[in-house]
Image: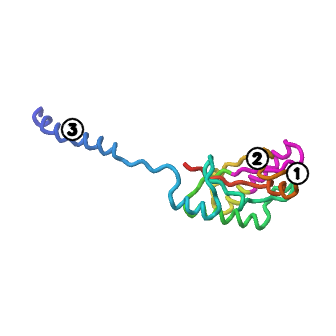
Amino acid sequence: MTKRFSVLRFPLFTLLLALFALTGCQSVPPKGLTPEQVAVLKREGFAPTDDGWAFDLSGKVLFGSDLDSLNSQSESIVERIGKALLSVDIQRVRIDGHADASGKAAYNQQLSERRAQSVAKALAGIGMQPQNIQTRGMGSSQPVADNRTAAGRMENRRVSIVVGSE
């Protein structure tokens, strides 16, 4: 019996050593976005930022004064973007709602949150999982245009769709 164990010890040891070596060789899935995903983001008008890729100003989703619901044109834009993201397996997004500087800060904060929720609802409607959609209200803290003009205030009433890089 002892001799049989010593004969089996070498192959068993070799097998265990091989298993440990193979475990160390397993490839780790790459972090970040694939070239195909980046191509779709660029095609849809996203631009790289410190937070990832953001739907840039030329394709922003605008809202009327004191409104938090998407108009039909904006709804179409959000649906197109959502379908494009899902087509390349981008499942997670962050929605940042914004408001102009009209009114009180607390109200603008709530309005921007409702705007973000409106876009999140539209994305969920085309198949993005609600738990993968993070929303934030930014109030009027990040204007992109002059709030002293009607055109500037209109540009500041927007939502940004952000895709993380990892």
Which comes sooner in the sequence, label 1 or label 2?
A: 2
Q: Give the tally of numbered discs.
A: 3
Residue for badge 2: 142
Residue for badge 1: 148
Name the residue: 78% across, 53% down: 115
Residue range (magenta) = 95-118
Q: Residue furthest top?
A: 2
Q: In the displayed structure, does residue 145 sit left or right of residue 85?
A: right
Q: Position of residue 30 (x, y in %)?
A: 46, 50
Name the residue: 13% across, 35% down: 6
Which comes sooner in the sequence, label 3 or label 1?
A: 3
On residue 131, which mark appears? none
Between 79 and 14, the residue placed more toward the observer is 79
Q: Residue furthest left?
A: 3
Q: In the displayed structure, does residue 124 sit left or right of residue 10?
A: right
Q: Position of residue 13 (x, y in %)?
A: 21, 38
Kind of residue sitting beneath label 3: Phe
Residue for badge 3: 13
Dot 2 alpha-carbon crowd within 10 angstroms: few under 14, some 14 to 19, many 20 or more: few
Between 64 and 5, the residue placed more toward the observer is 64
Q: Residue furthest right?
A: 103
Kind of residue sitting beneath label 1: Arg
